[in-house]
Structure formats: C-alpha cells, structure tokens
Image (cartoon, rainbow, N blue to C red):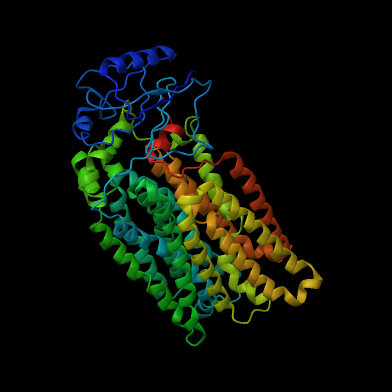
Amino acid sequence: MLSSVVVINSPQALTVETLKMQASTYAGRADSGFGLQTRRRGFERSKTFNSRRILACSNLRMTERSSCFGLKLGSASMGIELGRPRARVPSVFGESAKPRSIRASASEGDIEAVAPLKGNGKSSGSVLPYVGVACLGAILFGYHLGVVNGALEYVAKDLGIVENTVVQGWIVSATLAGATVGSFTGGTLADKFGRTKSFILDAIPLTIGAFLCATAQSVETMIIGRLLVGIGVGISSAIVPLYISEISPTEIRGTLGSVNQLFICVGILVALVAGLPLAGNPLWWRTMFGIAIIPSVLLALGMAFSPESPRWLYQQGKITQAETAIRRLYGKERVAEIMNDFNTAAQGSSEPEAGWLDLFSSRYWKVVSVGAALFLFQQLAGINAVVYYSTSVFRSAGITSDIAASALVGASNVFGTIVASSLMDKQGRKSLLLTSFSGMAASMLLLSLSFTWKALAPYSGTLAVVGTVLYVLSFSLGAGPVPALLLPEIFASRIRAKAMALSLGTHWISNFAIGLYFLSIVNKFGISTVYLGFATACVLAVMYIGANVVETKGRSLEEIERALSPAV
C-alpha cells in the first residue's frame, strides 16, 4: 500500500484553487480513496482551532466555505508538503511524535495518527483536584495490600490460628482473590455507568470490608472482610488509571498517570508505619483495618462532585455534558479544541462498544497481549512477594527491627516513584521500563548471592536490606508506575475499560498465586533460588519490552488509537 504524509505548517499562502489541484494530485496517488468530512457540530466549534494541523486527505472535496478536520481552508494561509510514498503503513512503535503537528496515512481508508492537541493559552480549569480524589482509590489499594504485612502475626494470635499457616495464607490472599473479581467487574461498571459512578459504587465493598476486618471475631468473618476489600481494590485498580488518563492533558499525562503508583506506594508506606504501635498494643491491628473506612467514604463523597470523563460522555452521545466536563477540567478556552479532536476521532466510526471476545480478535490482540504481559512480568519479578513478606525475610536475615526495615522499603518505593514522575514525560515510558527491569534483575541477583555465598554470610543482613531497597527503587522507576499508565494509552477507546480489566485480571491472578504459595516455595527451594527465579523473569521482561512495547510519550490518546487500532 502507498502511504503519504501531508504537513500543514508553513506561512506560505496558497489560493484555494492551487490547494484543490495539489489535493487532487495527492488523491490520484493513493491506491484506495476515502473522503473525510467534519461534522457540522465540530465545524461550528472549530473557528478558533489552531490552523497548524496535518491532514490525510485523498479524494478531498473543498470549497470556499468547506473544512477538513475543522480547518477553514478558504481563508487559511498555509503550505503543503507531500511526503514521499512509502511501501508500508507507518507504525507508532518506535516513533516519537512531534508536538503541534499531525501525521496521517492513507492506507485502506484508515487514519493512522493524529498528534496531540495542546492549548495555546493559559487554562482556567484544573484536573489536579479530581486526580487527587481518584488517588484515594490508589491509597486504599496500597494500604490494604500492605496492612496485613505487620498485622498478620497479631491477627493470628487474636483469632487462634498461629499454627495454621494455610489459613494465614488465605487471609493474605483473600484480598487478591477478591481483587481478581473486582478488576473484571470494574471494566464493566466503567463502561456501563461511567467512571465517577463506578468510584462511588466501589466505595461500598471497601467500606463494608474494612468494617468486617476491624470487628472480626472469627476467621470466617476476617476472610469475608478481606474478600470484600479485595473486590473494592480490584475495581479501583481498573478505574483509577483509566479515569486519570482520560482527564489528563497530553503534555502532563505521564506525570499525572504516575501519581497513581505514587499513591499506591504512599498507601503501603502508611500501612507499614501504622503497624509500629503493634509491639505495645497487640489489639492495634483492629484499628489498622478500621481506619481504612475514612478514605473509602471520602472517595465516594469526592467523586459525587467530580466531573465525568469527557471521552466517556462523548462516546455515550452526551455532547452537552461532555462540553461541561471539559469546561470544568480545562477551562472554557479549550472546549472547541477538544470537542473538535473528539469529532475527528469519531469520523467514519459508528462501531458499537466492544465485547469481551473482541479483545481476542486479530485487530486488538497484539496490544491486549502487551498489557497482560506487562502486568504478568510485574508480578513474576517478585515485587509483591517482597512487600508482603519483607518482615519475614528481614527477620531471617538477622534484622531485629523488622517493621522499621519494611517501612524503609515503603519509603524507597515512594522516593523512586517521585523520581519516575519527573522523568515520565521526559525520558518516555519504554526507556523507564527497560531501566527498571534491568535494575531489578541486578538487585535480585545480589540478594540471591547474599544468601548463597558463605563468604557473604556475615553481611547477609545488611545485603538483604540494601538489595531489597535497590530492588524497590528500581521497581518504582518503571515497572511499578508505567504499566498502569501505558495501557490506557495504547488501548482503543472502545476496548479501553475491558482491556484494562483483562490486563489487571492477569495481574491479580498472578498476584494471588504468588501470595498464596510464596512461603511454601521458599521453604521447599530456599530463598536464594526463588530470588534467582525473580531475576530471570526480570531479564525476560527486558527482552520482551525491547521487542514489543510502544513509546507513547507526547502523543494524545486519539493519535495512539489511530496508530495501533485503525478502523476496519
């Protein structure tokens, strides 16, 4: 197939007749023609839209008062540069977008890429308060995963299961089992009811589950409470990154997206610090579970006053509500611009919402498999095993203050994620992933050797802490924040919620298995061998990422969608 690129960014003036001639010449070179028309609504709202855009138009019909992608051609001063035809459709894999330009390809009638839209003036809106409300879900995610780390020993004593490690494993893993169910449920809820209402519904199992855990007088009640909490955590894990990615401006989407992981780390750290009074008050564990009710209620209240995702509203045909949401998020100055982008993205597409089986079609499976693989590698690299059982590992290595050592791990996670947030929109997602998994492999190798070499035995405690801290730092630079940020970017809008749910389902299933069997595997094979296995998984992840992962830095969601999931 022939593919050409049209770039409109020159001040040179052309007459409309000249433009017609050049466009006709271009149309004749394409082996399949297609027409592009802008909806009347998008045209009327685009009078102030930036004229420096790139259009792919073959068989284009223009008049003095016509427009293509919202650009009025009769009065614009512009130049047209026709790119050299290429033998294949350009791919977004490995490419980097140039700001304030738009690339498009003519191949079988599919628009391949449109560049990010960025406002010229200062926006009068702000997304930060709403990102902050959504991140209450991320805090609860991290808190409920980390709270059992320090409390498990005291829960076991209070409920009389000190000798029953299997039941203790179920208290840990019940949350993960619930999260698996919740992650799939979250995608369906987000598609049916919208993002903000899904958050409100999510607060129900989070609140009830926390209450049951705090008041449990039996193992059964404790496990039910942990299961409900897990369902809430699973829903949060799906809709928090989804909501943040859909309301974030392109130019800072990477930074805001990584805030999700930052607050997960904050939640884990808070849970570890909350366990410090346990030594003096063995019943403190009930308070640790109970205080999670507060952010759950605040999440529901905050989302009741937060704007819905404009992209979801537009997909539902709620145009007026979408404009209102855009006005609240970005300011009235950007309403026409962003609505025009939505109109452009919707051109020629009248496809219904995707079903679950569509995720496995040849059209989408490549990007869906990348999402599932990233979360699988994240778990096989061993991060949650480190978080869940860091206290036990440090104790076996001779570290006396195990809770303090675990708190150090949490602080390292927070620090590394802050660094990643500052680098996300500068270095890009893929490079951070490669650096992260490479560092994790080296750290796990160090940990493995510290338990194997007799010469290192006197230093095994110190090396266990140093290796674990370096591992967590490496994880928080890429493997932690990037997958949840990258996946909403690479998934097409019609499959985004369900594809996120499927990917996170992979995450929670593998997470559940590791949480349930990690101690048993350690007892059978030894901690050194287990850490060596984690290091091997990190090396495999580096190889996979280098071959399959796309760079999305500086690209709008609509641009990425056209490049990876062209309409058929």
Which residue appears farthest toward the right when viewing the image? 455
Quadrant of res 165: bottom right
Residue drawn at the location 32% of the way across and 33% of the way down = 52
Quadrant of res 126: bottom left
- Residue 494 appears left or right of 445: left
Residue 79 seen by the camera: yes
Residue 343 rendering spot, x and y as whole percentages: 28, 33
- Residue 486 appears left or right of 468: left
Residue 316 seen by the camera: no
Quadrant of res 475: bottom right
**Near-viewer residue (24 or 252):** 24
Residue drawn at the location 23% of the way across and 32% of the way down = 42
Residue drawn at the location 26% of the way across and 35% of the way down = 340
In the rendered image of this protein, does residue 98 appear above or below residue 185?
above
**Near-viewer residue (279 or 80):** 80
- Residue 2 appears left or right of 351: right
Residue 541 rendering spot, x and y as whole percentages: 62, 48
Residue 370 rendering spot, x and y as whole percentages: 53, 42
**Near-viewer residue (321 or 357):** 321
Quarter of the picture containing the C terminus is: top left
Residue drawn at the location 38% of the way across and 35% of the way down = 101
In the rendered image of this protein, does residue 444 appear above or below residue 185?
below
